[in-house]
Amino acid sequence: MSLIHKSAADLGALVARGEASAVEVAQAHLDRIAAVEPKVNAFLHVDAETTLAQARRVDERRAAGEELGPLAGVPIAHKDVFTTADMPTTAGSKILEGWRPPYDATVTRRLREAGLVILGKTNLDEFAMGSSTENSAYGPTRNPWDLSRIPGGSSGGSSAAVAAYQAPLSTGTDTGGSIRQPAAVTGIVGMKPTYGGSSRYGLIAFASSLDTPGPFARDVMDAALLHEAFSGHDAMDSTSIDAPVPSVVEAARQGDVAGLRIGVVKEFGGEGYQAGVLARFHETVELLENLGAKVVEVSCPSFTTALPAYYLIAPSECSSNLARFDAMRYGLRVGDDGTRSAEEVMALTRAAGFGPEVKRRIILGTYALSSGYYDAYYGQAQKVRTLIARDFQAAFQQVDVLVSPTTPTTAFPIGERADDPMAMYLADLCTIPSNLAGNAAISVPCGLADEDGLPVGLQIMAPVLGDDRCYRVGAAVERALTDRWGGGLLAKAPAL
Ligand code: GLN
């Protein structure tokens, strides 16, 4: 098996035993990137020299006898919304084109400390707003399963890079589904940790009460290893949880569901869902039952109001967060020729620098927060948020985890929903409740839809700080299905 087809755990072990150098492993992935990137467009920035220098440092640390973690020498693709002191950071926006941050995000710093080798920065919907990566100012990323389709979003560059074997691991951020939905539609694993379980310091903010960094990988164990590598308390993030990281690696190793109570969310499924998605979902629920879980149906009535509440809360926070792009402090500055006022330069810069979806969100959010409307829109949405959290609390009295399809449909064609924001927003129907409540949720592959042969994701939702349960159930499903398929789902992906 070539290096690019190995798991992150295996690559880390090869490097640890001295059977491969970090430089060799990095070079194999750089070669893969060079070969398939023209088709996929997963990266906004790749710099072989910086990558190889990082790999050399890992080899030196090893040679000096330094004790390094299980992922030392493993390459990773990093979402271009985390600051990196040695690489540009754009958030997929023209307004930050060419910006070099003066510091590393906490997630970035922890990747480096763990000896992970950053291959480059991945494409995303501008400021992480979108479900298809079509809102990137730098062109869409393509789904490795079918290059005419979207790889999900907003972390579409990160999902595509892992599915295309350009990297065994990548980072993402999930505000309304941006890790789980891209993972589902590219046939990989994507985890949204408990809110506050992973640091937002140095993450370019979209909606601060929702934004959550998390891992992508081709299997559950690799995702768990990466989760542990960058999670945990950070004094630099005021909403970071000061508690031990749940034992997700141990849970992934365990991977059994005997005696576990699993709730199927009654409100998710039916009209608007693709038949092939529902078929794979129901089969997987049956499989869990056969593996010894006790499956019951659970009603979460407020989940049906999550989408509208999210589209008031997220834009409200975004309108406030994006006020910092004022043409003075970062990136782009338009029309500063000495004849214009600061306000005029700011207006010209924001008009030229932000794309249409970002502008739509800023306008929506500013409206929802404006005097006279605040209670009716933002205030009301916050109440819905409380109801959703209560639905989860009630559900987790009865069951250990909840399951649903991750997304209502498989990957849609590029362009299909680009002019229809409502259709685009529906991609996150099932993922948003976990963001509003702040609990943990994962997407693991559960098969291919009959209609189009494209991957389907199973979403497993757990209580706040119950991240380990997501991995435990995810690993059980993965094991059973890998046996059935005679290999991982990506073994079935058409070669690029
Ligand atoms: N698709 C959702 C949105 O556009 C979620 C994005 C995200 O999680 N960053 O807001």
Image (cartoon, rainbow, N blue to C red):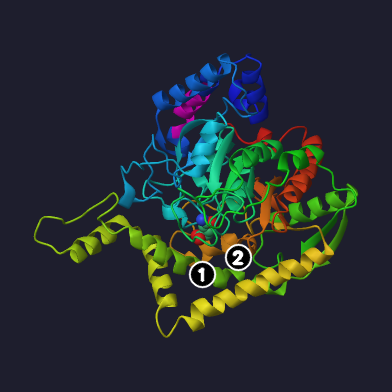
The answer to which of 328 and 218 lies nearer the viewer is: 328
Q: Does the magenta portion include 328? A: no
Under mark 2, the amino acid is Leu
Q: Characterize the magenta stretch by its predominant secondary structure.
A: helix
First-in-chain label (1 vs 2):
1
Q: Is residue 195 above or below residue 219?
A: below
Q: Is residue 394 above or below residue 487?
A: below
Disc 2: which residue: 436
Q: Position of residue 412 (x, y in %)?
A: 55, 53
Under mark 1, the amino acid is Ile
Q: Position of residue 328 (x, y in %)?
A: 25, 55
Who's the residue at 69% across and 58% down the image?
464
Who's the residue at 64% across and 73% down the image?
386
Label 1: which secondary element: helix
The answer to which of 94 and 422 lies nearer the viewer is: 94
Who's the residue at 45% across and 56% down the image?
205
Who's the residue at 68% across and 47% down the image?
244
**Disc 2 within 8 angstroms of ligand 1 (CB):** no
Q: Is residue 288 above or below residue 391?
A: above
Residue 8: image quadrant is top right
Could you tell me if residue 135 is visible in this image?
no
Disc 1: which residue: 313
Label 2: which secondary element: helix
Q: Position of residue 272 (x, y in %)?
A: 64, 66
The quadrant of the rendering that contains the C terminus is: top right
Q: Are marks 1 and 2 in contact (CB under 8 Å)?
A: yes
Q: Which residues are magenta?
A: 28-37
The answer to which of 153 and 48 lies nearer the viewer is: 48
